[in-house]
Image (spheres, rainbow, N blue to C red):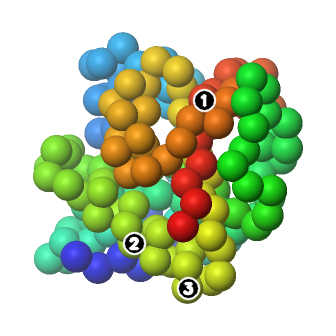
């Protein structure tokens, strides 16, 4: 599988993966990615800013994530816990895997590639957040070596569980 930055030409395929992920979340009563989030403008901005990455298998988009090597404003305050590290970190957002690749280890392969990308940039900490009811993601993060650190609040006030992994 090839892990690379997403290009504008990938946008329709990325939006299909996002659509599939929204259906999965809805079917599993997960209160995340509702009310139009993430939309084409957000994913397009991720591509234009160089945040969007894809995992490609035999020319087919298998998964996507936004990897941001900038400080996350909402991570500056954490409640009922603390971050493992205080230095530079990368933030992972908008993780999604094509329904054709779900339960095949694709997300784990993508995470390993994200870790390699971080190490290549001299970044040794990964941070991510998820909804407290998103048990599939919570289990996946622990399986990948992330540690639960506490609670953060999004700019709109929504509560999220925060995780970190040191590399």
Examine the rendered structure and indicate whether residue 40 appears above or below residue 78. Answer: below
Examine the rendered structure and indicate whether residue 39 appears above or below residue 3. Answer: above
Q: Earlier in the sequence, mark 3 or mark 1?
A: 3
The residue beneath circle 2 is 113
Callout 1 crowding tier (Cα within 10 Å): few <14, some 14–19, many ≥20:
many
Residue 117 spot, x, y in % from top left = 51, 77
7 lies left or right of 161: left
Quarter occupied by the N terminus: bottom left
Examine the rendered structure and indicate whether residue 78 appears above or below residue 15. Answer: above
Label 2–label 3 contact, CB within 8 A: no
Label 1–label 2 contact, CB within 8 A: no
Rendered image: mark on residue 161: 1
Residue at the (58%, 60%) spot, across then down: 166
Residue 26 spot, x, y in % from top left = 35, 20
The residue beneath circle 3 is 120
Residue 63 visible in this rendered orientation of the protein: yes
- In three-dimensional space, the C-alpha distance between marks 1 and 2, rounded to whole angstroms, equals 23 Å
Label 3–label 1 contact, CB within 8 A: no
Residue at the (85%, 44%) spot, across then down: 76
Residue at the (41%, 79%) spot, across then down: 4
- In three-dimensional space, the C-alpha distance between marks 2 and 3, rounded to whole angstroms, equals 11 Å
Residue 21 spot, x, y in % from top left = 34, 38
Q: Quadrant of residue 24?
A: top left
For numbered disc 3, what is the local secondary structure? helix
- In three-dimensional space, the C-alpha distance between marks 3 and 1, rounded to whole angstroms, equals 27 Å
Residue at the (67%, 30%) spot, across then down: 150
Residue 36 visible in this rendered orientation of the protein: no
For numbered disc 1, what is the local secondary structure? strand
Residue 30 spot, x, y in % from top left = 41, 19
Quarter occupied by the C terminus: bottom right
């Amino acid at each position: 599988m090839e892990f690379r930055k997403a290009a504008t030409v990938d946008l329709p395929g990325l939006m299909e993966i996002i659509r599939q992920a929204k259906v999965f979340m809805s079917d599993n009563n997960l209160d995340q990615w509702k009310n139009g989030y993430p939309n084409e403008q957000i994913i397009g901005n991720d591509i234009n800013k160089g945040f969007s990455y894809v995992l490609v298998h035999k020319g087919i988009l298998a998964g996507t994530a936004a990897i941001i090597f900038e400080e996350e404003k909402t991570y500056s305050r954490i409640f009922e816990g603390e971050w493992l590290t205080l230095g530079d970190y990368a933030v992972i957002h908008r993780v999604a895997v094509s329904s054709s690749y779900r339960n095949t280890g694709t997300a784990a392969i993508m995470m390993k590639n994200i870790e390699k990308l971080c190490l290549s940039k001299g970044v040794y900490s990964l941070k991510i957040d998820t909804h407290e009811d998103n048990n599939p993601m919570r289990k996946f993060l622990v399986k990948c070596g992330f540690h639960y650190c506490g609670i953060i609040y999004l700019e709109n006030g929504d509560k999220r569980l925060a995780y970190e992994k040191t590399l």
